[in-house]
Amino acid sequence: MLTEQQVLEAIRPIKDPHLGKLLLDLDAVKELKIKENLVSLKLAIAEPGTAEQMQLQQEVVNAIKTAGAESVGLRFEKLPEEVIAQHGGQAEQEAPESLLDRTDRTTFIAVTSGKGGVGKSTVSVNLATSLARQGKKVGIIDADIYGFSVPDMMGIEERPKVVGQRIYPVTRFDVQVISMGFFVEDNSPIIWRGPMLGKMLNNFFSEVEWDDLDYLILDLPPGTGDVALDVHSMLPTSKEIVVTTPHATAAFVAARAGAMALKTDHEILGVVENMAYFESKLTGEKEYVFGTGGGQKLAEELETDILAQIPLGQPDFDEEVFAPSVYDADHPIGKIYMDIAQQVIDKTAK
């Protein structure tokens, strides 16, 4: 059984990245609990919610797991200002250019839904890859902080590189990808407070070394909660795609997400009705498993178009290029996504 002393010894060589001082010398360990080799740790550091924290997070988790822990849950808080000053903390450097300053050359497209489970992330991933297949420079931010899934959907196993204060996104299918999932070890829980969430999302815009992008896709959390509202407020101008199923309830709650977009002066590009029907491979007959009409009703309410009605289905399995949610361009559903991408290009032409 792992002991508290063993955990402290494991992290003894690790320093606060901002102050360059040992965590233990800063009395950074504010809480340490161990239950059946599951370690829960709260650390106070000089600059939480930054690229350096992400790097520190991986270092701490790796050290504790090497000592014998099965899983590590981390929480972070800020050191008191007097402690930071005592140890030579410096004023924050001038912020680098943010992606939010590139609205003249990058089109932001938020993909949202009223509820979870309607395929919003699948639409985000396949829209991004389809735009890249049409020669566009594309990035995607997995802004669904608590339900991040984009790396798994795209079959991404590597992590972003952190050099100094800059994060370099992972590129897959010619799409630059950043996700909170990259910085969570083996699905270990990390508890975020509201202000820190907003800061982390802002870091995805300002501290990531994005190439010049034609499109940035944001996979938003479902609903109209704080995180979704923060993202809407951060973006000075954004386009929006609302995802629903044909079911009346899904369409009803999606209308609220669309209404929030309109209230924050975002333009709705259209509605994607996912899981619209099931088509038999044997007979070609369509079965409307979740009913009909939800997408059309939602589009009418938001005064926009239906970009596509996507059937139930799954990508072809490829052992060499594993990406469980990405459709090939010549797959029947992949062709639908290519058509959505072309509509997006046409609607956003500058």
Image (tube, rainbow, N blue to C red):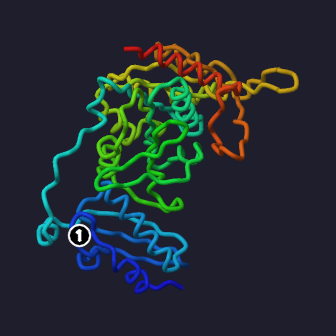
Q: Is residue 24 left or right of residue 218?
A: left
Density class for disc 1 (Cα within 10 Å; few <14, some 14-19, many ≥20) is few
Q: Is residue 96 left or right of residue 125?
A: left
Pick out the residue farthest to the right: 282
The image shows residue 206, relative to residue 68, as above or below, that is above
Q: Nearer the viewer, residue 5 or 212?
A: 212
The image shows residue 337, relative to residue 228, as above or below, that is above
Q: Quadrant of residue 133?
A: top right
Q: Nearer the viewer, residue 97 or 253?
A: 97
Residue under the image location 47 percent in, 37 percent down: 219
Residue under the image location 44 percent in, 45 percent down: 178
Q: Nearer the viewer, residue 102 or 199?
A: 102
The image shows residue 289, relative to residue 342, as above or below, that is below
Q: Is residue 98 left or right of residue 287?
A: left
In the rendered image, residue 347, in percent from the top left (x then y), is placed at: 45, 14
Secondary structure of the residue carrying numbered label 1: loop
Residue under the image location 66 percent in, 31 percent down: 328
User: Disc count in the image?
Assistant: 1
In the rendered image, residue 162, in percent from the top left (x then y), is placed at: 36, 55
* Residue type at numbered disc 1: Gly
Q: Is residue 50 left or right of residue 170?
A: left
In the rendered image, residue 187, in percent from the top left (x then y), is placed at: 52, 59
Split into 4 quadrants, where in the image is the C terminus? top left
Residue under the image location 39 percent in, 64 percent down: 57
In the rendered image, residue 120, in percent from the top left (x then y), is placed at: 55, 34
Q: What residue would you read off at disc 1?
A: 20
Split into 4 quadrants, where in the image is the N terminus? bottom right
Q: Quadrant of residue 225?
A: top left
